[in-house]
Amino acid sequence: MPPQHTGPAEFAADSPSPRPSPRGGEGEELRGEGEGRERFVVIHSLEHARAALAAAEAAGTSVTLASAEAAGGYAGPGWFTAIVDIAAAEFPGVVTTCVLDCGEEAGTVLAALRLGLRRVRFTGPAAAAARLNEIAAEIGAVIERDALEPALDLCDETDPAAACRAFLAGAGFAARPRI
């Protein structure tokens, strides 16, 4: 039986947590060159999130779970946070962060921040991004504008687990950046 999901309050910024929240901004230090470079796996389901975290556990590495482009608008921040929370609870030893892509929807960014996400991607107008950055900074969140690369999008993968293992092991897998 899967662990019971307790909801967004589980990872609220002011609540103690036995491990870093996958919703936090701690993935920022993973960006960069070489071995420590952050790698994104674009998930579309709980199965995808589990495959990515299992592969990260097997490889002894961290991973960032990312939503598909503009998924915050069509699937919603609640759906994404639930998937990330459930999968992270099943793999407590894996350091993971997440990024929800909200496309050009500023309102969806605000909803994601209210749910406790601390890394959100926004591709809307620069003026709106500046204001969202101010709001996000007040709560320790980050609004990202750049493409998430390198990224493996699991949308069309027939074997998500194998694709994740190859990507995270660095076995020369040619990732398809889609976001």
Image (cartoon, rainbow, N blue to C red):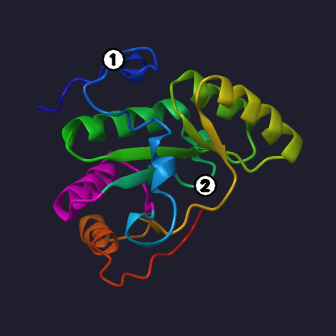
Q: Residue under circle 1?
A: 16
**Few, some or many C-alpha atoms within 10 Å of disc 1 (few <14, some 14-19, many ≥20)?**
few
Asked if residue 102 can be seen in this view, the reply is no
Give the quarter of the image for residue 156.
bottom left
Q: Quadrant of the N terminus?
A: top left
Q: Looking at the image, which is closer to me, 86 or 24? A: 24
Is any part of residue 40 visible from this angle? Answer: yes
Residue plotted at (52% across, 64% down): 32
How many marks on residues? 2
Say what secondary structure mark 1 lies in. loop
Residue 139 position, x and y percent, is 60, 23
* Mark before the other along the chain sequence, 1 or 2: 1
Of the pair 157 and 64, the residue shown nearer to us: 64
Residue at x-position 20% and y-position 39%: 90
- Residue 69, image x, y percentages: 60, 55
Judge left or right: residue 176 versus residue 139.
left
Q: Quick check: 27 left or right of 147?
A: left
Region in magenta: 38-61
Residue named by callout 2: 69
Q: Is residue 158 above or below residue 2?
A: below
Question: Residue 162, percent across and down?
Answer: 24, 71
Q: Tell which of 108 and 59 is nearer to you.
A: 59
Of circles 1 and 2, which is in front? 1
- Label 2 neighbourhood size at 10 Å, few (<14), some (14-19), many (20+)? some
The residue lying at 34 percent from left, 34 percent from top is: 20
The amino acid type found where label 1 is placed reads Pro
